[in-house]
Amino acid sequence: MEIQFSVVSNEIVPVVLANEAAGAVVTFEGRVRNHNDGRGVDRLFYEAYEELALSEGNRILTEAERRFDILKIVAIHRVGLLEIGDVAIWMQALSSHRKAAFDACEWAMDEIKKSVPIWKREDYSEGNPEWLKGESIVSADTDRYDRQIRLPEVGCDGQAKLHAAKVLVVGAGGLGTPAVEYFVRAGVGHITVVEPDFVDVSNLNRQISYGFADVGRLKVDVLHRRVQDIDHSVEFVPVAEKLDEINVEALVASHDLVLDCTDDFAAKYLMNDACVGAGVPLVTASIHRWQGQILVVDRGPCLRCLLPVPPPTFCVGTCEEEGILGTVAGFFGILQANEAIKFLLGVDGGLSDTFLAVDLRDYSVLRINRPVRSECPICSTGQMTSLDSDIEVELCTVVGGAGIVFVDVRQTPSPQELMDLVTDCVVLGSVEEAVERGAEQIVLVCQRGRTSLRRAFCLRDEGVRNAYSLVGGIDRLMKERDA
Amino acid sequence: MDKVEIRVSYFASLRDQAGMAEEKVALVSCSVFEVYQMLARKHKFDVAGRFIQYAVNSNFVDRDYVVAAGDHVVFIPPVSGG
Ligand SMILES: [Zn+2]
């Protein structure tokens, strides 16, 4: 045997491998040091995904033998509890001339750190031991995922996909908590949870990650600990904020998939628009007493294709008002996680053009095909016809009219830039100011005409019936100016 | 004008307010929106017709879809609980 990678739990006893042709023997010992990142380290605990560690380690040594002119290369990685000074990894390379053995050792060590699934926990002098992800690709043990890896749709490839996945869960309530727990157990590698609320005793009938002792604590903090209890290798990012127009785009764009577990229409539509814009799939669910509904927005019809504008919150009940059984919330939260996991594995769930509703009292099931609507303000450039069809206007149709006022509604407004583009028109800094002035038409302008359209609908629902949105926004104005 | 008979299903809060999951209705053919307006008056629904999703025979339709005899119409109000 010219190459061998092994994992041992006993102390490593260094030896010199015999080979008469070897003019050079290079030995490397990686030892436990007493500090890391400025913190005092007392000891280390190594854990391996052994089966994969062995195959990956041997693959690296085989590659080292191919790349460098060596006679033999062997490496041993120790797992379990190690004290300061103990040898964690031992490697020896033999070659005719020293350079090849030095190079092979260095290259193989780098590769092993990068991709062999062995991870470590550092116990610090000041407490708070920490699991370090290290640089390995998989940080898990085979047994944990064995039952799902056996599924033909999962396998080792699928497990690696789940491990590499980044999911965003908005809302850590009755839908969100079961979904997150199933994500963790399935081995989803990165989970970000957005939730600003604190645990209330009335949450406990359905929000399964919280206990009585957690009442009054921040939900994301309790959930973080719960996730670490289940699997400390999961990267969990708590975001104790409300989802809003400012944070939604960056949050959505940095994930592979979004789960809408909120009970808030404004948030659902924010996610819908950001997900369609960024091309990130959205799995959304809502529950009402015994009934729940789920649909997936993924390159097909979106929420606005069903209902172009979010209904005002007053016309929709919440769990608080309507009542909800924990099992119903749990059922739909798990259904969402199930759809998400299928998507990450590349298994078509069939819900991206379907609306599925299930009544858990009488088990009636409703499946309705969803088309992409040509008048959807997000999916198409067509104008809205079903609701307030006059809400979008073009510059040429409004310019020159008396009493017309433009308002820049971008996140960072630049009234001066807008003024240069709509010469001879009144540009104001806020909608309130425009209303106060008694403007006849208030034309909202944003970068592309989407935010302004959303805002105009909101204003109309609030009673500002003369709110309009400029089609195409600043981008279109600039194009027309340059044409 | 002749009347057509259709089947109407109520979903979520509408089911609660109507006190039934579905009913058969005979009416002069009109749009699903008008059907809703009529039944909303009858059952005192508190959701405006502009916020209802209309489905006929397992497909979502525009609110000006005109019902035909034998259609199965489902009214789905906005649901946001989570
Ligand atoms: Zn759409």
Image (cartoon, rainbow, N blue to C red):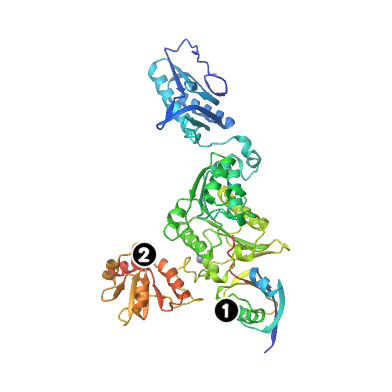
A58 or A8, nearer to the observer: A8
Name the residue that disc number 2 marks. A410
Above or below, comparing residue A77 to residue A168 in the picture: above
Query: Residue A287 appears in which quarter of the rendering?
Result: bottom right
The amino acid sitting under disc 2 is Arg
* Image location of residue A68, percent across then percent down: 43, 23
B56 or A20, nearer to the observer: B56
* Image location of residue A289, percent across then percent down: 66, 64
The amino acid sitting under disc 1 is Asp
Q: Is residue A24 left or right of residue A220?
A: left
Viewer-nearest of discs 1 and 2:
2
- Assign the C terminus of chain A to one quadrant of the image: bottom left
Q: Is residue A142 left or right of residue A474?
A: right
Calculate the distance from the C-alpha at mark 1 to the C-alpha at mark 2. 35 Å
**Chain of the residue displaying label 1:** B
Name the residue that disc number 1 marks. B64
How many marks overall?
2
- Assign the N terminus of chain A to one quadrant of the image: top right
**Chain of the residue displaying label 2:** A
Above or below, comparing residue A82 to residue A371 in the picture: above
**Kind of element beneath mark 1:** loop
